[in-house]
Amino acid sequence: MADFTISSASTLMACRYPFRADVAWPPEGEPDEACSKGAAIHAAIARYVNAGEEALGLGPAWDHALAWIKANWRRGWVGEPAYAWDHATDEARLIGVDIGRDYTANGRRPGEIAGTLDVCYVDGSTVYVYEFGTGYDVSHKAEQLRLQCLVAARAHGCSRAVGQLVRFADDGAYPSPPVEYDEFELMAIAGEFADLLSEVEGSEPVPGEHCSLCNLAPVCPAATSIVQALLPAEGLVRPGWGLVIASPDHAAWLLAHARLVAAAAEAVKDAVKAYVPKAGLSLSDGSMLVEGHRNMVRVDHARVESLARSLGATDAQLDACSRSVVESAGLKVKKAAKAKRKAT
């Protein structure tokens, strides 16, 4: 089975195609700033949990993460434990702690699904699993957490599991309510994922919002056909649309057309949103097409400033609370400067 790990659970729920053994994944590109920041915080959490080492200079999200971990610390916590689960036998085992993501090199056997938990500990017949997120939207981690609870319970011989998702942001820590699973619920999760994994062979792509979580999009036939349908005719003429860049000018052409495709996709989404009534639409398979909502925490800077002033803060103190941050605005084409004509 190609590239399926426990963290891929939400993608598996929506589309089995990326995990077919005959699907070749494209090489991974450089991680973006958000991914690098998240990886650094996760690594720092593991170092603190396992060795008591406090990292420095990782920013406010890490400060909130460290404060939350200290406040919720339990004896027996283990950071970055890696497990392997055989869905055919519903058996799992611990294969190492803080070993990275090369599970095969660390003993994963053929047919096993592997993955790493952020923090796990066992108390009697109950295993506790914590999954941490550093993005604005971590709702997709709920499916991952369910599977993590199952695998950890099987590996430690526990009949009960408790999982909790905690999002760390620059303005605080946001823990979700813990979810509890008894032995019957764990058995149901095992059966559900075993059925999903049995559907991988011969599956076809199912485009949807989950595509944003899948790195296979550049070579997925469904994604490719959708993108090509949005491109102008010249985009199909070489050198045109594709992952192979032929020249600097071709790179600039690709960048411009990628933005056109993104704009066209947004227009399609707006059209669909306008078409769907507030009550939603019934689909042929019995499901519903409805508008989803999520609560996002936003800091009201005007209210914060007003509160600070009411408590006696001065302009100098407020200025000291702000900082200048240089962020990447993405690639752009900078026009060549025009030569100035000399006066005669």
Image (tube, rainbow, N blue to C red):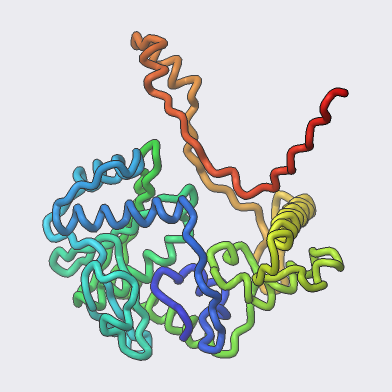
- Residue 97 lies left or right of residue 302; in this view the side is left
Q: Give the x, y percent position of residue 101.
A: 34, 72
Q: Residue at x 65, y 52 (%)?
A: 291
Pick out the residue farthest to the front. Answer: 344
Q: Residue at x 22, y 66 (%)?
A: 127
Q: Is residue 243 above or below residue 40?
A: below
Quarter placement of the C terminus: top right
Q: Give the x, y percent position of residue 274.
A: 78, 50
Q: Give the x, y percent position of residue 272.
A: 76, 56
Q: Considering depth in this image, is 301 or 286 the residue closer to the camera? A: 301
Q: Considering depth in this image, is 328 or 339 the residue closer to the camera? A: 339
Q: Is residue 250 above or below residue 106?
A: above
Q: Is residue 328 above or below residue 90?
A: above
Q: Is residue 286 something one can see in this rendering? A: no
Q: Give the x, y percent position of residue 281.
A: 72, 60
Q: Quadrant of residue 181?
A: bottom left
Q: Residue at x 32, y 51 (%)?
A: 41
Q: Is residue 274 something one can see in this rendering? A: yes
- Residue 265 lies left or right of residue 216; in this view the side is right
Q: Is residue 288 above or below residue 308?
A: below
Q: Residue at x 39, y 53 (%)?
A: 38
